[in-house]
Amino acid sequence: MAEITPIRDKTYFDALNEIYNQQRVLSHLKFVGNEVARFIKYLFAEDQLFCRVPEHPSYAGQKELINKLDALARQGESSF
């Protein structure tokens, strides 16, 4: 998904491109971790621009998903 989603922000595009260009020198697991972490951060930034999760118990699952993805991104970043 990260490779086919249009990236509107040049900073995120450059960061993803840099990770992609380092693919030959990184282990596959580290490459995937870096790519996923950067892509999740990009999606969070885009979501903050265009939508928000309502403060209502019905949306608790959305908040939980955001927290899990954030934890995954931080874990991937630690492999930078």
Image (cartoon, rainbow, N blue to C red):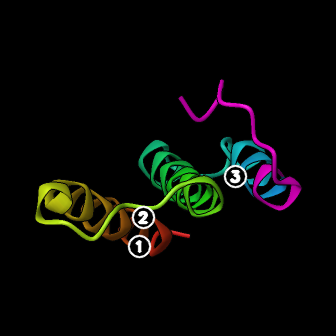
Q: Which residue, given by chain and number where applicable, does mark 3 sit on?
A: 19
- Image quadrant where residue 48 sits: bottom right
The disc, 3 or 1, on the residue closer to the chain's N-terminal end is 3
Over which residues does the magenta segment extend? 1-13
Which percent across, then down, holds residue 76?
43, 63
Q: Which amino acid, by three-letter code, is at mark 2?
A: Ala
Residue 73: assigned label = 2
Which percent across, then down, holds residue 27?
50, 49
Of marks 3 and 1, the one in the foreground? 1
User: Which secondary structure, mark 3?
Assistant: helix
User: Which secondary structure, mark 1?
Assistant: helix
Q: Residues within 10 Å of mark 2 (few under 14, many from 20)?
A: many
- Considering the image in quadrants, where does the C terminus appear? bottom right
Nearer to us in this view, 38 or 18: 38
Q: Which amino acid, by three-letter code, is at mark 1?
A: Arg
The disc, 3 or 2, on the residue closer to the chain's N-terminal end is 3
3D distance between C-alphas at marks 3 and 2: 14 Å
Tell which residue pokes out farthest to the top in this image.
4
Tell which residue pokes out farthest to the left in this image.
57
Nearer to us in this view, 60 or 54: 54
Residue 17: assigned label = none
- Image quadrant where residue 65 sits: bottom left
User: Which secondary structure, mark 2?
Assistant: helix
Q: Which residue, given by chain and number where applicable, does mark 1 sit on?
A: 74
